[in-house]
Every structure is written in C-alpha cells, then in structure tokens.
Image (cartoon, rainbow, N blue to C red):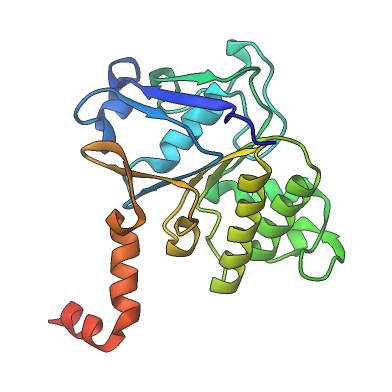
Amino acid sequence: MRQEPSLRSVRIDPARGGERAERLPFLSRGPVEIMLRCPLTFLIGENGSGKTTLLEAIAARCAIRPSGGRSYAAHEHDREATAISAAVEVTFAGRRPKGLFLRADRFADTMAQAGRLPMPATGEWRLADEQSRGEGVLSLLTARVDASEGLLYLLDEPETGLSPQRQMALLCLLDDMHRDGRSQAIVATHSPILMSHPGCDLLWTDEDGITRRTLDEIPHWRDMRRFMGDPSTALRRLLE
C-alpha cells in the first residue's frame, strides 16, 4: 500500500544560512519552500545551481550521513554541519525516516565501506570497491531496495559513469521504489533518461527559485531530444 512520502516539505531561508546560502542562485529572490508529494522527485538544474549543496543540507537535517552510512544520533549537536544546513527546515509525515545519502564526489568512500554486494546482472557477490562505479551504484541500491526497508534516498547524480543501458536499469530500480511506495527518493540529476519517469515530480532549480515543471519544460530534456533528432544540424548550429 502506498504511503505518504516521509519527508513532506523543505524550506530554505537564506537569512538563516549565512553568506554561502545567500550566494545560491535559487535563493536570490528570498526563501524557497518545496512541497514533496511524490515518492520520486528529481532535482534538476545547471551545474552550480546548488542541487548538491541542498541535498547535503537536507541530509544533515534528516540526520543522514553524507557517505551513505548509518543515520546520525537524534540530537542536533551530533549532526555534521554543512554549508547551509542552518538555513533548512524539514517536516515529516510521521517519524523521521532512516536514509541513504550518496554524494557523487564521495562515492569511492561509500563503496569502500559497503563490503560484498551481489552484482545485479549476474548475482555474483563481489567487494563493492572492486566493481566499476556504474556496477557499484546499481549493486548498492539494488541491495537496499531488495531489503524491503522503507528509506529516504538522497542521491546526487547517481547516473555518473553509467552507460545509457545502466541508466535505464537505474530508472527501473527507481520505478520499483516508486511503485512500492514505502521509500522516497530525491535525486539530483542531469539525465534525460532518469527524469523521463512518468510518475515523478520534476523540480527545476535556477535563479528564479525551485519550481515544479513538466518534462517538456525541462531544458535538459528539450535540448537532448532536439540534438538526438538531428545530430548533424544540431552540431552545425553549435559550431556556427
């Protein structure tokens, strides 16, 4: 049975986050509030728009360790400080969920701690840090999803290093989470493949704030569709 998403809302107030928060493009017009209504939410924007910084702050407020380890203790002073965590407030539907936060720039550390995992394609058990990055992402997430434990997944560009076929496999895995309904995922991504999920929420991040958009309104999707439809013409225009 589908449940209401564990994390219901996120509010970011630059006045509470210091100079770093004030410099983030999506806070240039003041506080931003995100209502999370779906088990699967994609956070999309250009490089430097603040997606990873925001995920990191959400993880801190939800007491989730940044390298995918166990949750922090419940007390505020036991949580790791982040660049803008003071600017962020979160509300939950019920009890605060357990979570998994995978940062793109700390993935090697995460895999070094993961131990042996079954590889999705073959079922062979192999040390996580002996797998390629793409294999490791899928192995780690598949193991967590198959454990049937409801988690809050905060995933920072999980498509990094994945072939198109592996991105499709990741999309299927995220769809399993979405249909099961017990887990919730917020995914920062540039991947048109991932953001094409028909049941997800798409949040576009730029200097105007964070706004909910349809797939056709996402520049990443429009640009890639245009390019793949006629690569020769698109390339010629780029080089003019």
* 112 shown above or below 2: below
Give the residue displayed 30% in from the left and 77% down from the top.
227
On the image, the x and y values in percent for residue 33 come to 35, 25
Q: Is 237 displayed left or right of 140 in the figure?
A: left
Residue 49: image quadrant is top left
Tell me the quadrant of the picture where the N terminus can be found. Answer: top right
Residue 128: image quadrant is bottom right
- Front residue of 85 and 45: 45
On the image, the x and y values in percent for residue 172 come to 63, 60
- Front residue of 195 and 88: 195
Give the residue displayed 66% in from the left and 39% down from the top.
68
Q: Is 108 displayed left or right of 29 in the figure?
A: right
- Front residue of 182 and 53: 182
Give the residue displayed 53% in from the left and 22% down from the top.
61
Residue 18: image quadrant is top left
On the image, the x and y values in percent for residue 13 come to 32, 20
* 93 shown above or below 219: above
Q: Is 73 displayed left or right of 21 in the figure?
A: right
Q: Residue furthest bottom?
A: 232
Give the residue displayed 40% in from the left and 26% down from the top.
84
* 220 shown above or below 57: below
On the image, the x and y values in percent for residue 219 come to 28, 59
* 140 shown above or below 234: above
Tell me the quadrant of the picture where the C terminus can be found. Answer: bottom left
Q: Residue furthest front?
A: 1
- Front residue of 176 and 78: 176
Q: Is 118 displayed left or right of 57 in the figure?
A: right
